[in-house]
């Protein structure tokens, strides 16, 4: 007889946001672009305990390039929403991880350079495709 409960595990939640989408932080009101994510919080316990809000660890967490800054934040999905402003994101790492914009879907196009927090990539990003139009100044 087959027992359907053997080996059953819950499927992880699918991310609500995609790499390249621009988001707003609900509580701290900053904008940024999703560069990578984890299915659950992978931060060390001491970092998590020092976090003022301590959202549920068992949800998708995103790495965000903060617009107008030089830093990256690690944010729980419950703390962000999709940005509706249509304004471009300014960040020194933007061109390292993105090569253009998909205007129809209002998101930046992620390249294949791996994002590894605290460890810069070994090589420069690949050049954009030859047929890629330049990023418009008012995106």
Image (cartoon, rainbow, N blue to C red):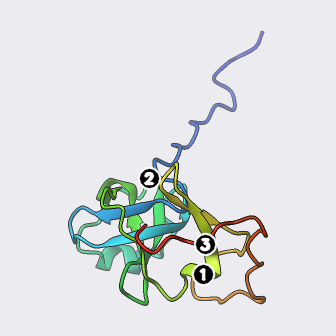
The answer to whether residue 106 is above or below residue 139 is above
Question: Viewer-nearest of labels 1 and 2?
Answer: 1
Q: Which mark is residue 134?
A: 3
State the residue at coordinates (55%, 43%).
12
Q: CA distance from mark 1 to mark 3?
A: 12 Å
Question: Viewer-nearest of labels 1 and 3?
Answer: 3
Q: Which mark is residue 58?
A: 2
State the residue at coordinates (32%, 75%).
49
> Is 42 displayed left or right of 76 in the figure?
right
Q: CA distance from mark 1 to mark 2?
A: 31 Å
Spot occupied by residue 109 in the image (x, y as percentages of width and height): 61, 63
Q: CA distance from mark 2 to mark 3?
A: 39 Å
Rendered-image quadrant of the C terminus: bottom left
How crowded is the residue under tag 1: few (<14 C-alpha within 10 Å), some, or many (20+)?
some
Residue 116 visible to an observer of this rendering? no
Foreground of the two, 64 or 133? 133
Residue that protrudes farthest toward the top in the picture: 1
> Is 8 displayed left or right of 138 in the figure?
right
Residue assigned mark 1: 95
């Amino acid at each position: 007889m087959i027992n359907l409960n053997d080996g059953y595990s819950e499927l992880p939640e699918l991310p609500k946001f995609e790499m390249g989408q621009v988001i707003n932080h609900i509580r701290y009101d900053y904008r940024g672009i999703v560069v990578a994510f984890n299915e659950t919080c992978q931060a060390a316990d001491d970092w998590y305990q020092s976090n003022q809000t301590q959202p549920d660890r068992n949800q998708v967490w995103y790495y965000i390039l903060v617009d107008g800054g030089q830093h990256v934040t690690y944010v729980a999905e419950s703390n962000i929403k999709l940005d509706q402003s249509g304004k471009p994101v300014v960040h020194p790492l933007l061109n390292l991880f993105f090569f253009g914009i998909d205007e129809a879907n209002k998101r930046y196009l992620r390249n294949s350079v791996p994002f590894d927090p605290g460890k810069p990539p070994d090589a420069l990003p690949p050049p954009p495709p030859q047929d890629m139009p330049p990023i418009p100044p008012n995106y």
